[in-house]
Image (tube, rainbow, N blue to C red):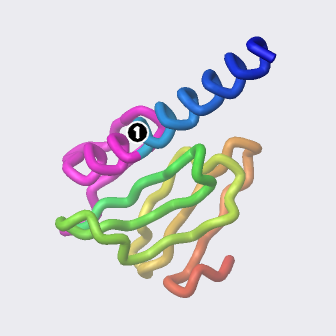
Amino acid sequence: MRKNMNKKILVILICMLVAIWSAFTVVTSTNVEKHEFINNCNSIKQGGNTLITDHLGSRVIEVDSDGTIVWQKTGLDEPFDAERLANGNTLISELGGRVIEVDNGGNIV
């Protein structure tokens, strides 16, 4: 019984740490000026907004200077880089080697 309780406590602590770490990562990533890795996110400043590749969240998001999400593409396979193209679309590369171009509506073009 005590062994099961210790496992439950450990799982709860790990979940809490992951939640805190994720929140910290998103907050710090909104102030990134150059292309660099921060924890599990890769960010690049695009005009006044920032593109963030969230590896663990399987998504790419764009946030404004207040940290508000203004665009996102979800359901990706551990994205590790994203680049806004001149035509307004976003080029995204995933861990498995797939590279896709996504329009503002989130559709793969």
Magenta extent: 23-48
> Residue 79 versus residue 15: which sits nearer the camera?
15
The quarter of the rendered structure image containing the N terminus is top right
Q: Which amino acid does label 1 sit on?
A: Ile
Give the labeled residue for mark 1.
Answer: 20
Q: Position of residue 57 (x, y in %)?
A: 58, 52
- Specify the farthest residue to the front: 1
Write the residue at 26% across / 67% down: 49
Residue under the point 68% across and 59% down? 76
Q: Vertical placement of 94 versus 46: above or below?
A: above
Q: Position of residue 40 (x, y in %)?
A: 48, 37
At which x and y percent is residue 10? Answer: 62, 22
- For label 1, the SS is helix
Say if 104 sits above or below 75 in the image.
below
- Judge left or right: residue 54 versus residue 11: left
Quarter of the image for the C terminus: give it. bottom right
- In the image, is 81 to the left or to the right of 99? left
- Residue at the image position 77 percent from the left and 12 percent from the top: 3
Is residue 73 within the magenta segment? no
Q: Which of 9 and 78 is in front in this view?
A: 9
Decide whether residue 39 is among the magenta residues: yes
Q: Decide: few, some or many residues near mark 1? Use Cα within 10 Å; few <14, some 14-19, many ≥20.
A: few
